[in-house]
Image (spheres, rainbow, N blue to C red):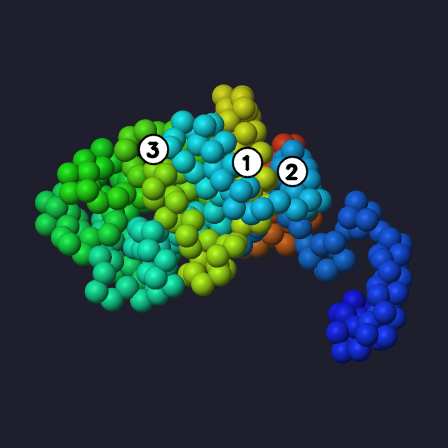
Amino acid sequence: MINRRKLLKSITALPFVGSFVGIQELSAQNSVTKTVGTALERDFFKELGLRTFINAAGTYTSMTGCLMPKEVTDAIGYGATEYVNLDDLQDKVGERIAELLSCEYATVTSGCFGAMSIAMAGVLCGNDPKKVKQLPNTEGWANEVIIQEGHQIGYAQALTNVGAKVVLVKTAKEMEKAINKKTAMMWFLNANTENGEVKWEEFVAIAKKHNIPTFIDCAADVPPVSNLFRFTEMGFDMVGFSGGKGLRGPQSAGLLLGKRKYIKAARMHTPPRGETIGRGMKVNKEEVLGMLVALELYLNKDHDKEWKLWEDQIELISNSALAVEGVRTEIHVPKHANHVPSLRIRWDENKVKITADEARRQLREGHPSIQTVGNKTTIGITTWMMTPGQERIVAKRVHEILKSAT
Ligand SMILES: *Cc1c(COP(=O)(O)O)cnc(C)c1O
């Protein structure tokens, strides 16, 4: 096979006559490409020496998030065949998403992290192009973002990356006291709602009283589908979702929903504009379309039926584990974020003589490979990121591994 890199290098290095030869070589390369097989004929991961696995863990970036439905990959494939103006595409898709989600405006972002960064950048700079160029240098500006202590997680770096300074508070009283001329935004982490004293409505009310824009991180907060509407309706100015978690869109995409003026300001930082902090957070047409279609599919799906499927799958795996003496299971649903039927398996190590780490290693390294979560004493399983049917394989393997340790 002709080495494409070498070929391109030789073309750029050659003068006119040489480049003519190069072009001929390139078309030869094209015909070679045809003979090496289409995507459908090639097992790329195998070719690369990578093992694929059953995802019994959940939506993890390290595990490449989620699988996209065919309608979504078709939209991505369609997008790759034509040129359009990037800003026009984002404008139109933003309007369409806003209509679907009954909010003022929307834009497709590079994940929820990207949504947070450009939203924060937009709030910091407004519509001032001079300020846009200056990020992350925000010295002397209103650059503080208020966060409840219980909501402080690593992802808040999306805010500080663009030049915001975090101010931590505990109570509503502290929150009001922390608001001053330097306050730019207030940030709420839905996943940690229970770890903060101030809940949604009160948070929004305090911010509104002082005219401070609010952002809620809802990255992993579908299901339930109602969350796509709930927080814009409640009065949060900006809401961020991951595209490649429950929505099953591109893993590198996300949604920023909310007030038009803030989303317009956020867009000042995104490609095609180059002298911006968000230039590296590019979302191209393929992902924009993929995200739109993933959202449409998500809104149209039978959520009750899907929930019942997950419950049945979890119950099947649970029963299979319970058939081994000494094993206990617990079925639970996280209240906020990753709100899906989930299973914890633990056992009496006097009866089942294997550690949780070792059992998880055997699941991971067996055939097929199965990824789970857990800690020193438990295996954690969800089924929402699996392909239906795989729950039977997981149930069988869990049983086999635990049984063989008795
Ligand atoms: C996943 C996640 C993010 C990051 O979202 P991406 O879409 O991966 O950029 C941010 N916040 C929370 C709470 C998350 O769970």
Question: The disc labelled 3 sits on which kind of residue?
Answer: Thr
> Could you tell me if residue 230 is visible in this image?
yes
- Callout 1 touching callout 2 (CB < 8 Å): yes
Sequence-wise, the earlier of marks 1 and 2 is 2
> Could you tell me if residue 387 is visible in this image?
no
Q: What SS does tag 1 mark?
A: helix
User: Badge 2 is on which residue?
Assistant: 75
Residue that appears at 84% across and 75% down = 18
Label 2: how many residues lie within 10 Å, few (<14), some (14-19) or many (20+)?
Answer: many
| Image-based side of 20 in relation to 288, left or right | right
What is the spatial separation of the Cα atoms under label 1 and label 3, in whole angstroms?
A: 18 Å
Question: The disc labelled 2 sits on which kind of residue?
Answer: Ala
Estimate the x, y position of residue 148 in percent, counting from the top left: 22, 49
Q: What SS does tag 3 mark?
A: helix
Estimate the x, y position of residue 71 in percent, counting from the top left: 65, 33
Residue that appears at 30% across and 39% down = 237
Disc marking residue 232: 3
* Image quarter (top left, top right, bottom left or bottom right) of the C terminus: top right
Above/below status of 80 relative to 15: above
What is the spatial separation of the Cα atoms under label 1 and label 2, in whole angstroms?
A: 9 Å
* Image quarter (top left, top right, bottom left or bottom right) of the N terminus: bottom right
Does the beta carbon at disc 3 come under 8 Å from ligand 1?
no
Sequence-wise, the earlier of marks 1 and 3 is 3
Q: What SS does tag 2 mark?
A: helix
Does the beta carbon at disc 2 come under 8 Å from ligand 1?
no
